[in-house]
Image (cartoon, rainbow, N blue to C red):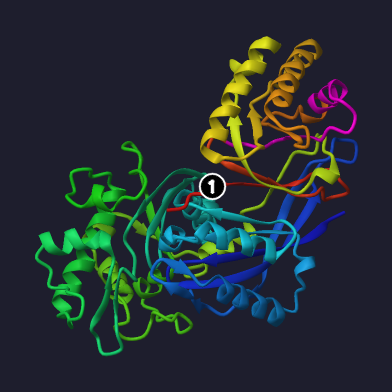
Amino acid sequence: MAEQILSVGIDIGTSTTHLVFSRLTLENISSLAGCPNIQLSDKEVVYRSAIYKTPLLSRDRIDGPAVKGILAKEYERAGIPRDEVETGAVIITGETARKENAREVLHALSDFAGDFVVAAAGPALEAVLSGKGAGIAELSRQRGLSIANIDIGGGTSNIAVFKNGESLDTSCLDIGGSLVEFSSEGEVVYIADKLLPLIREEGIGIVKGSIPREADLLKLTRLMSTVLGASLKQKQDERWLSHLITDHPLEQDLSIDAVSFSGGVSEFLYGRSYKESPSSDGFHDIGNLLGNSLREADWLKDYELIPGEETIRATVVGAGCHATSLSGSTISVQDDALPLRNLPVIGLNELEQDLSPPLLSELIRKKADHVASWEQVGEFALTLPGRKDISYGELCRMAEGLVRGLTNSLGRDKPLVVAVEQDIAKALGGIMKRLLPPGRGLISIDRVQVRPGDFLDIGRPVAEGTVVPVVVKTLAFG
């Protein structure tokens, strides 16, 4: 029998803040005689908030109480009590993730928004969520194409390349519609620091306190467009590409068949004026000119242009509908230890997981010490691939090494958290539990793919206790 849970997606971006509520349908797709196989069978957006200008105390600080007030008002408008929201994500995006109090505000809002509404930040995650929210991930699966979705907001452009429904690679550039802002009279009131060398060396006449010529503004936005095109074509010799990339370029051998755009700037590229957007009037920023420059770019003619299902709301729909996944149904969990949030992930590879118990224990301790040195946390999740054909004896040896390593690395009040790719979590957890003292918390889940450097959130069991909601995310600030 299908079960529904309510999810929220909240996007705090460089220019705008908004949210959506979605209903996620959980359904057992296995036969009556088979082991349960719970899947998210449907995702429906049931409420879309107004779009607000992100409130700031200064160029360097978010106005946390004002953002919280926006969320409270929209929860009331939607008629949805916070205790009915079972999952979802608050994601802080673009230049807002670099604000001094970004981490503090984000975690406060996730606590406010619902029981298992998780905090997330980072350009790679944002790129993937916006591509999924725009429907491009699914479209790449349906058409068998390699499609790059470019989500252009106020501060950054996040690129995710999808094929067969999966993300192949991501990249982020400091290209956005609010990197130059104007007063109502047309005077320049803000220029992002990242653009200053480019403006100076290219001889572009944009100066704070002056009214620039449209020709100079177009010269800047056309150059931004050229850099985006060079990023897709992996032209590393483009002069300003390395300067504007914030994380890493796309892989050199990536073949791209089609391009889609989302984010606020895409409204102008597609020839629309998004009336709810506070940055869509006159010359308050360069978003409209950037959209026009992209639409007219020669490099775009090399690709099929595919409009997505969502534009300005792609990221928030992705956060509400696609951030949460489900574990496998062969799990072993202790309900009172959940939910768990923001667990840094340490990983074992196929060779390491088969080490003898003493060697495995020592390896886990070293990896845990390394994570503690840079994350300053007292708990973590351990991920390993597992093996489908593992014998009972091999499973017992693995469990012994895991228990020794984890108990030596965690405080007595911290649960042991193990995430396995193969469907062996219930058997593995059962053996580990016998090796642990009574009352020691243990969470063993499977069908979860995480990598070292990710963070893991695990919610309370759903679907009659057969699965747990899982969010794999990044927490990248600054």
Q: Which quadrant would residue 417 be assigned to in this image? A: top right
Amino acid marked by disc 1 = Thr
Across and down, in percent, residue 29 comes to: 79, 45
**Which of the two residues, 309 or 84, is positioned nearer the viewer here?**
84
Q: List the residue tagged with mark 1.
A: 474
Across and down, in percent, residue 397 comes to: 75, 13
- Residue bounds of the magenta highlight: 428-450
Q: Residue at x 75, y 22 (%)?
A: 403
Q: Is residue 361 visible?
A: yes
Q: Residue at x 33, y 73 (%)?
A: 287
Q: Describe residue 227's horizontal placement relative to residue 35 as left or right.
A: left
Q: Which quadrant would residue 289 be assigned to in this image? A: bottom left
Q: Describe residue 242's horizontal placement relative to residue 348 as left or right.
A: left
Is 185 drawn above or below residue 284 in the view shown?
below
Quadrant placement of the N terminus: bottom right
* Residue 441 is inside the magenta segment: yes
Is 251 drawn above or below residue 264 in the view shown?
above
* Category of crowding for the residue at label 1, using alpha-carbon neighbours closer than 10 angstroms: few (below 14), some (14–19), many (at least 20): many
Q: Residue at x 65, y 61 (%)?
A: 110
Is 227 drawn above or below residue 439 in the view shown?
below
Describe the element under mark 1 as helix, strand or loop: loop
Across and down, in percent, residue 384 comes to: 64, 27
Residue sticking out furthest to the left: 203
**Which of the two residues, 246 or 135, is positioned nearer the viewer here?**
246
